[in-house]
Image (cartoon, rainbow, N blue to C red):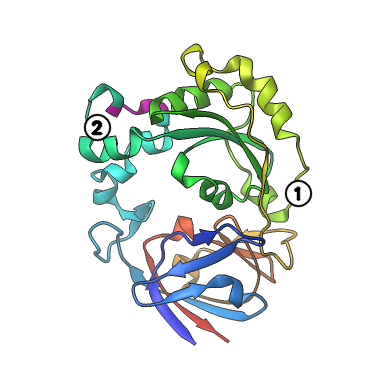
Amino acid sequence: MTYQGVLTKMETEFSSPIQYYLVFESDFLNINQLLDKTIEMTFVKYQCLNCGLDRPIFRQGYCKSCFFEVPQAADWIMHPELSTAHLDQEDRDLEYEKSVQLKPHIVYLANSSNVKVGVTRKTQVPTRWIDQGAHEAIEIVEVPNRYLAGITEVALKDHVADKTNWRKMLKNDIEDENLASWRGRLAEYIPEEVKPYFIDNKTETHIDFPVIKYPEKPKSLNLKKTLRYTGKLVGIKGQYLIFEDDTVFNVRSNEGLVVQIAVH
């Protein structure tokens, strides 16, 4: 079977193990069903997720001109503390910014390669944790807008990591942590205006990934340079496909690439 389409991040279904799906315009693949099968991936062309043109992808699935124009790629996406919709101040598109920023947000702890703090919209729990390859996570605060979540994350970054080591995450080189205990220790560092939103009654969420074999020395596949790759799929974790020869492919960081996938 051969499938072709533009890559966007894999859709997920929270079950044990997590179910992964690649959604193309005319095809729909349950990636779990490809485990232990040989897959051939071929780069076809670029397709910007905004303008749809065959232009080199700059970041986040967008060509360079779209990346600096669309509200979905503004600085407040990566830095929630820069959100201004709660002040009625526009960055790129106030209507869009209000639709995202003025929604309940969660500040959480996740254990993927180590314990880290992060921010996500409430509607993206537990999807965000799955995408990060976290095998356990817990909520710290639930706030009414993205700005409050952002300033909380900034305050906590002085006391806990805010990045995932992707190699360590993929090797599954992680230890179980008592995240409720971490939450209790970090509570005193939450900004005063956010303390009324502290959550202390949620328990850890545990996540089981469909992996037959973890890579010992993960090496990242650059399909734009390699153009074609063939390997046996042995796992899916975060937004990564894991192959038997320790090659790993980050689907999300390759959004905007049109690929052909052949299953042998």
Residue positioned 66% across, 61% down in the render: 16
Can you identify the residue that label 2 sits on?
A: 91
Q: Earlier in the sequence, mark 2 or mark 1?
A: 2
Give the SS element for disc 1: loop
* Mark 2 vs 1: CB contact within 8 A: no
Q: Which mark is residue 173?
A: 1
Residue positioned 64% across, 74% down in the render: 35
Marks 2 and 1, how far apart at CA: 40 Å
Quadrant holding the C terminus: bottom right
Left or right: 178 with respect to 63?
Answer: right
Residue 166 in picture, x, y percent from top left: 62, 49
Question: Residue lying furthest front in this view?
Answer: 201
Q: Residues within 10 Å of mark 1 (few under 14, many from 20)?
A: few
Q: Where 100 sits versus 199, above or below?
A: below
Give the SS element for disc 2: loop
Please state the extent of the stretch shown in magenta in the rendering.
81-85
Left or right: 203 with respect to 264?
Answer: right
Left or right: 80 with respect to 245?
Answer: left
Query: In which image quadrant can residue 51 be found?
Result: bottom left
Q: Residues within 10 Å of mark 2 (few under 14, many from 20)?
A: some
Residue 64 in picture, x, y percent from top left: 29, 50
Per the picture, the main secondary structure of the magenta-coloured stretch is helix
Asked if residue 119 is among those painted magenta in the image, a careful observer would answer: no
Residue 161 in picture, x, y percent from top left: 62, 31
Question: Residue lying furthest top in this view?
Answer: 192
Specify the amino acid type for callout 1. Asp
Q: Where 48 sits versus 145, above or below?
A: below
Q: Does residue 228 appear anywhere in the picture?
A: yes
Specify the amino acid type for callout 2. Asp
